[in-house]
C-alpha cells in the first residue's frame, strides 16, 4: 500500500529530526506537500499516518497536506498548462505528446511543529522522487 509506506517514511523522518533536536516531548503537526500526480489519496494517507504515529513521539500529531497542482511544459512551443486529473500530457497547442512535468510529483515534508513552544523547525528535504 503506497500510502502506508509513505506515512511510515514521513514518521521515520520526523522521528529522526526530533531525535536530532534532543528535547522533543511531542510532535503536534506535520505539514506535507503532496503533488497532484504523486498518486497519493489524502484520506488514505491521513488514516495510515495516524496508524504509523501510534506509540511514537508523533502520537496524535495532525497531518496537514498541501496539494501541489501538476503543471507541464511543451518543449517545442514552450506552452505551459495545468495537467489536471486524469493528467493530460500532450500539448494543448501543438499536440506534442512529450510534455515535461514541471510540478505535481512532490512528496516532501514542509514543516514540523514540536510541542515545546519553540518556533517550528522547517525542513525541506525531498523524501524521494519517482521518475
Ligand atoms: Zn506544444
Image: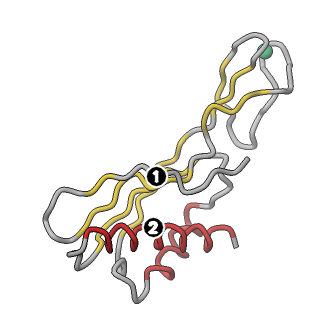
Q: Residue at x 37, y 52 (%)?
A: 123
Please state which of residues 61 and 124 is positioned toward the viewer in this rendering.
124
Seen as rendered, the residue at the extreme top is 77
Mark 1 or 2 closer to N-term?
2
x and y percentages locating residue 120 in the rendered image: 24, 57
Q: In which image quadrant can residue 63 be found?
A: bottom left
Q: CA distance from mark 1 to mark 2?
A: 9 Å
- Give me the disc on residue 18: none
According to the image, label 1 marks what residue?
125
Q: Residues within 10 Å of mark 2 (few under 14, many from 20)?
A: some
Residue 81 locus on image (x, y percent):
66, 24
Residue at image location 54% in from the left, 74% down from the top = 8
Q: In terms of secondary structure, where does tag 2 sit?
A: helix
Residue 130 image position (x, y, % from top left): 69, 51
Q: Nearer the viewer, residue 123 or 91?
A: 123
Q: Quadrant of residue 113?
A: bottom left
**Ligand 1: image quarter:** top right
- CB atoms of marks 1 and 2 within 8 Å: yes
Amino acid at each position: 500500500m503506497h500510502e502506508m509506506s509513505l506515512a511510515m517514511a514521513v514518521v521515520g523522518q520526523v522521528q529522526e529530526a526530533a531525535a536530532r533536536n534532543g528535547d522533543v516531548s511531542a510532535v503536534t503537526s506535520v505539514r506535507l506537500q503532496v503533488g497532484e500526480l504523486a498518486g497519493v489519496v489524502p484520506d488514505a494517507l491521513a488514516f495510515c499516518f495516524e496508524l504509523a504515529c501510534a506509540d511514537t513521539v508523533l502520537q496524535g500529531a495532525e497531518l496537514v497536506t498541501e496539494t501541489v497542482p501538476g503543471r507541464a511544459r511543451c518543449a517545442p512551443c514552450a506552452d505551459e498548462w495545468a495537467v489536471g486529473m486524469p493528467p493530460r500530457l500532450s500539448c494543448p497547442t501543438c499536440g506534442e505528446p512529450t510534455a515535461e512535468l514541471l510540478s505535481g510529483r512532490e512528496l516532501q515534508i514542509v514543516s514540523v511543529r514540536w510541542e515545546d513552544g519553540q518556533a517550528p523547525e522547517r525542513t525541506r528535504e525531498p523524501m524521494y522522487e519517482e521518475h
